[in-house]
Image: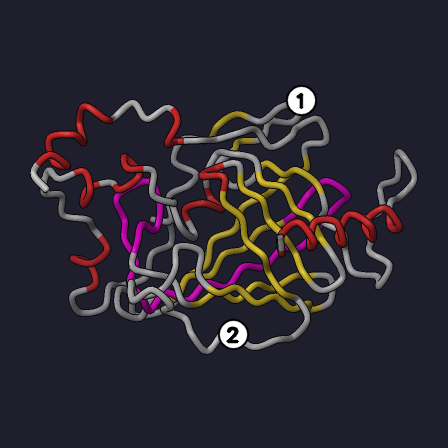
Amino acid sequence: MTLLILLVAATSVMGQARQAPGSNRIPRMPDGKPDMTGVWAGPGFKFTEGKKNPEINIGAGGIARNLPPFAPGGEKLFNLEKNGDPRHDDPQLLCYPHGMPRTSLASHAQEFVQGRDHLAVLYEEDHIWRSIPTDGRPHSKELDPFGTGGTFMGDPRGHWEGDTLVVDTVGLRPWWFDARDHMHSDALHLIERFTMTGPDRVSYELTIDDPKIFTKSFTNTWEMRKMPDWQIEEYVCEDNNQDLDLIKPFLDKQ
């Protein structure tokens, strides 16, 4: 219900800030902030000028670029040591969420619905979403409500620095960094910076700080493009799980 109210409220205001067709200006909200409402192709896609649709960019979702030195014991935490149990080696086989930042880096569409004091991001991947307050509220006092070290998507808080939306996320449970068997700890701190560089372009900058794994933070940048002809499709891992034969022997032991 909360998400529905958010979407209705955001939709009611976003129509007030639409630019004229063919405009090269950045669309803006009534308060003057850039309006990122729309369906976007993110880091998991490769863009080629002259092509209407992007291609899936194999490897783009990996975070193993510009890595700083490992902290003591960090390399062992970072590289998953598989043991043959799919529940440990890749819980995605059981349809667990991919978590952050893996979800935002995936080759699936993501829809932004921007309101006055919230940004909702609806991810095609995992049929999951984030509700990001932009009204100045602090992080939650309870970052580990289920005793798992945090939550899959963490506790995001957004604020504007000029025309750049900065999203600060903490409270992430130890999980997958990406689709390359790289892991992060419960100390992970993410800073995302969304900067509209045109009416259909966003510079997405991701800064990763995990002091249990790395000696310092590091940053990578990708481009996102608005796809006006796209819509979020249904993605239900649980309804078409092709790995049941692989998983069943382990579940039968329980």
Camera-side residue of 15 and 12: 12
Question: For the point 72% across and 40% down, which residue is it?
Answer: 200
Residue type at the position of mark 2: His
84 to the left or right of 172:
left
The quadrant holding residue 58 is top left
207 to the left or right of 196:
left
Placement of 218 over or under 14, stated as above or below: below
Q: Picture coordinates of residue 130 (x, y %)? A: 54, 53
Camera-side residue of 100 and 91: 91
Q: Picture coordinates of residue 140 (x, y %)? A: 49, 74
Camera-side residue of 5 and 143: 5
Question: For the point 46% across and 44% down, which residue is it?
Answer: 105
Placement of 211 over or under 79, stated as above or below: below
Tell me which numbered mark, 2 or 1, is placed earlier along the sequence: 1
Asked whether 210 falls inside the magenta stretch, the response is: no
Q: How far separated are the C-alphas under marks 2 and 1?
A: 40 Å
Q: Secondary structure at mark 2?
A: loop
Q: Which residue is mark 1?
A: 52
Give the number of the disc on residue 174.
Answer: none
Question: For the point 52% across and 64% down, which residue is it?
Answer: 156
Extreme right residue here?
A: 20
Placement of 123 over or under 245, stated as above or below: below
Q: Picture coordinates of residue 237 (x, y %)? A: 39, 31
Q: Which residue is mark 2?
A: 139
Quadrant containing the C terminus in the rendered view? top left
**Snapshot colouring:** secondary structure
Read off the magenta span: 175-202
Residue type at the position of mark 1: Lys
Question: For the point 67% across and 60% down, which residue is it?
Answer: 118
